[in-house]
Image: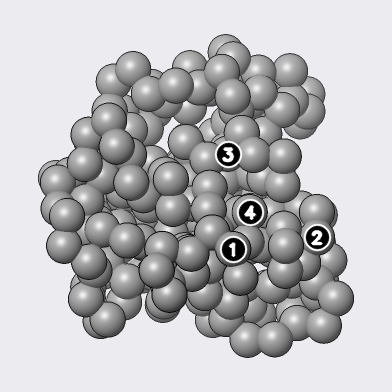
Amino acid sequence: MPFRDGNRSALEPRGPVEKPRAAVLLLHGGREHGTAAPPPWDPPGARLRLFEGAIRRSTSEGGVLIGRVRYRFRGWNGEREDAAQDARRALRELELLAGEVPTILVGHSMGARAALRAAGDPLVRGVIGLAPWCPAGEPVAHLRGRRVVLLHGDKDRTTDPRSSLDFAARAAAAGAEAAHVPMHGSGHAMLGRAAAWHDLTARAVAALLGLADLPPEIAGRFPPTGTPR
């Protein structure tokens, strides 16, 4: 398959789906800097794997392909934005594999930043950011017409919940349908109230793909019109 780095594809499909009608790509967290390859099993990847089963159940009737984005490096690495580049590579591989299917990106921390950066891709319908890393000045213009849901624990000491709120407001001003949802009593690792994180994320994915109604916890935080501006 094209777009490989050596023998390593950017896309890891999770189980066969015959003739997928939609897709969900998972992007785990990482570090601000780091040029070593991610180890086969590490906490950021393990945390996001816990969401996979819930998402699979919520989309089981939709012909949805679930995949993971493989990173070449553990870090974002400044202007290289390696994780975002890998997300874009994975989307191109997904298109070759499944065609032009509507796709939702689900990312945690650095993975959420990568997902938001890659969300201007024509395949992407929406992004769910979990405890996202949203530095000041992150671009938002490319999110016009996309649906963006940011879930952030109010006890997070790694990424700032206020930055998610600011990002959602700027994305909405740029024409996205954006919502910030506080997860009370939870920190960056999403271990506090883990079941609530998994359930809300899975229901949000199904809703953004048109397979279910938006969870009320999210619907009430979107603009009153319910449509992108």
The quadrant holding residue 97 is bottom right
Q: Are marks 4 and 1 in contact (CB under 8 Å)?
A: yes
Q: Position of residue 98 (x, y in %)?
A: 77, 67
Closer to us: 191 or 135 = 135
Dot 3: within a 10 Å radius of its alpha carbon, few (fewer than 14), some, or many (20 or more) residues? many
Q: Are marks 4 and 3 in contact (CB under 8 Å)?
A: no
Q: Position of residue 105 (x, y in %)?
A: 56, 53
Dot 1: within a 10 Å radius of its alpha carbon, few (fewer than 14), some, or many (20 or more) residues? few
Dot 2: within a 10 Å radius of its alpha carbon, few (fewer than 14), some, or many (20 or more) residues? some
**Three-letter code for the amino acid on which mark 4 is drawn:** Arg
Q: Are marks 2 and 3 in contact (CB under 8 Å)?
A: no
Mark with earlier residue (2, 4): 4
Mark 4 → mark 1, Cα distance in angstroms: 9 Å
Mark 1, residue position: 2
Secondary structure found at label 1: loop
Q: Is residue 142 above or below residue 121?
A: above
Q: Is residue 119 above or below residue 167?
A: below
Mark 2, residue position: 99
Mark 3, residue position: 119
Mark 2 → mark 4, Cα distance in angstroms: 10 Å
Mark 2 → mark 1, Cα distance in angstroms: 15 Å
Q: Position of residue 127 (x, y in %)?
A: 56, 45
Secondary structure found at label 3: loop
Quadrant location of the C terminus?
top right
**Three-letter code for the amino acid on which mark 2 is drawn:** Gly
**Three-letter code for the amino acid on which mark 3 is drawn:** Ala
**Three-letter code for the amino acid on which mark 1 is drawn:** Pro
Mark on residue 92? Answer: 4
Residue 184 as seen in the image, left or right of residue 195: left
